[in-house]
């Protein structure tokens, strides 16, 4: 059985079978809704149900609270239609000509950028053209059928390879393999590009980029694409980490201030160590942003980091700094809690 899904205010419609999620149905209809984790953990796909009934599926209670459910909110990556439904989804794009592919890749370079961060460079097949939009990610396809998602850190114009920033997850099966066993020339299969996170070119508003930890990766892709294409839209980057080691490409980000007109960089440490000799900003990155820009009415925010960071930033920036809800764009990095994660 299938049901009709209507998106407002766009008026776009598509059919959703009862055994597929709203997000799966939308992607099948070549519509890109906001999404990231696809497992009910990040909250990027959270939307309001205007009419009809949904099976909300399995999700994290901290991502969709009981109060939000009472307000009619749902996570489209795990919700299924029980009737014709009407949903409020303000950010909808039609899928372009970029195909999602399953490809092999060869490990070309492994760089330990920090004690718990590896920059992994993959060589792509010369016979296959791999296209993506700055901000998107890939899924590694593992032998046991599981997937591991990582954002692409290089610009789309830098063809022939992809760069990933991989943080070690304690007990994580895949990231432990990357840190302890992976070697150059290993072959990895992946699917991509995936995700709806990307710069909205139709807007002329100043951009604020907000990154936590390896959330820097898709931000790097966006900035380097701006450098490659000569776009000079004003950008300010707030990159937060616990300590100085977490700002693992600090010098590169500082170089962008020289290379890209209208670009500013503000690094922020939440718990600097004495050995860091840190004289810069301290605290949470999004709170530092609010101190500098208490009125975000005329801005767009692009945020990447943990679900907790994304949720706090979305709440505080919209409630306290007057940021329009549809001007907050996010990519949340979520990890499962068991030892199979990451």
Image (tube, rainbow, N blue to C red):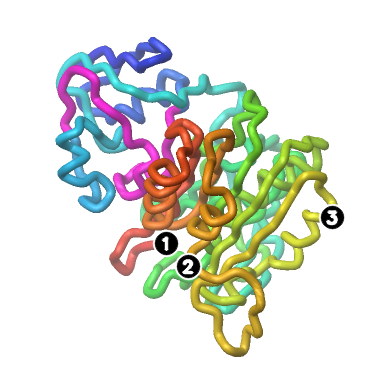
Which is nearer the eye, 51 or 295?
295
- Are there few (<14), some (14-19), or many (20+) residues within 10 Å of tag 2? many
State the residue position of label 2: 175
- Magenta part of the protein: which range? 33-55
Asked if the residue at tag 2 contacts the one at tag 1, i.e. Cβ–Cβ closer than 8 Å, the answer is yes
* Mark in the foreground, 2 or 3: 3
Answer with left or right where residue 241 lies relative to residue 44.
right
Q: What element carries label 3?
A: helix
- Are there few (<14), some (14-19), or many (20+) residues within 10 Å of tag 3? few
> Is 297 drawn above or below residue 338 in the view shown?
above
Q: Which quadrant holds the C terminus? A: bottom left
Q: Which quadrant holds the N terminus? A: top left
State the residue position of label 3: 258
Q: In which quarter of the image is residue 125?
A: top right
Which is nearer the eye, 306 or 17?
306
- Are there few (<14), some (14-19), or many (20+) residues within 10 Å of tag 1? many
Q: Residue at x 75, y 48 (%)?
A: 263
């Amino acid at each position: 059985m299938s049901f009709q899904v209507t998106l407002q205010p766009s008026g776009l419609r598509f059919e959703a079978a009862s055994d597929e999620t709203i997000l799966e149905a939308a992607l099948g209809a070549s519509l890109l809704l906001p999404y990231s984790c696809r497992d009910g953990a990040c909250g990027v796909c959270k939307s309001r149900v205007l009419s009809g009934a949904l099976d909300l599926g399995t999700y994290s209670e901290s991502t969709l609270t009981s109060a939000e459910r009472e307000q009619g909110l749902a996570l489209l990556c795990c919700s299924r239609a029980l009737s014709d439904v009407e949903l409020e989804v303000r950010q909808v794009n039609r899928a372009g000509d970029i195909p999602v592919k399953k490809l092999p890749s060869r490990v070309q370079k492994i760089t330990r950028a920090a004690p718990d961060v590896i920059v992994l460079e993959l060589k792509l097949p010369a016979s296959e053209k791999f296209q993506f939009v700055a901000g998107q990610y890939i899924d590694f396809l593992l032998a046991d059928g599981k997937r591991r998602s990582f954002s692409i850190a290089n610009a789309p114009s830098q063809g022939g390879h992809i760069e990933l920033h991989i943080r070690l997850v304690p007990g994580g099966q895949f990231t432990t393999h990357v840190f302890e066993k992976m070697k150059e020339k290993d072959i990895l299969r992946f699917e991509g590009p995936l995700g709806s996170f990307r710069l909205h070119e139709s807007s002329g508003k100043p951009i604020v980029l907000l990154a936590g930890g390896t959330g820097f990766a898709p931000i790097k892709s966006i900035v380097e694409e701006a450098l490659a294409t000569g776009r000079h839209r004003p950008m300010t980057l707030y990159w937060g980490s616990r300590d100085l080691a977490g700002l693992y490409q600090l010098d590169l980000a500082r170089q962008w201030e020289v290379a890209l007109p209208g670009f500013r960089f503000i690094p922020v440490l939440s718990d600097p160590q004495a050995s860091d000799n840190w004289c810069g900003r301290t605290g949470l990155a999004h709170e530092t942003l609010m101190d500098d820009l208490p009125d975000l009415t005329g801005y767009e925010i692009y945020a990447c980091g943990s679900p907790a960071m994304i949720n706090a930033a979305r709440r505080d920036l919209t409630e306290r700094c007057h940021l329009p809800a549809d001007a907050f764009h996010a990519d949340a990095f979520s990890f499962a809690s068991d030892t199979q994660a990451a």
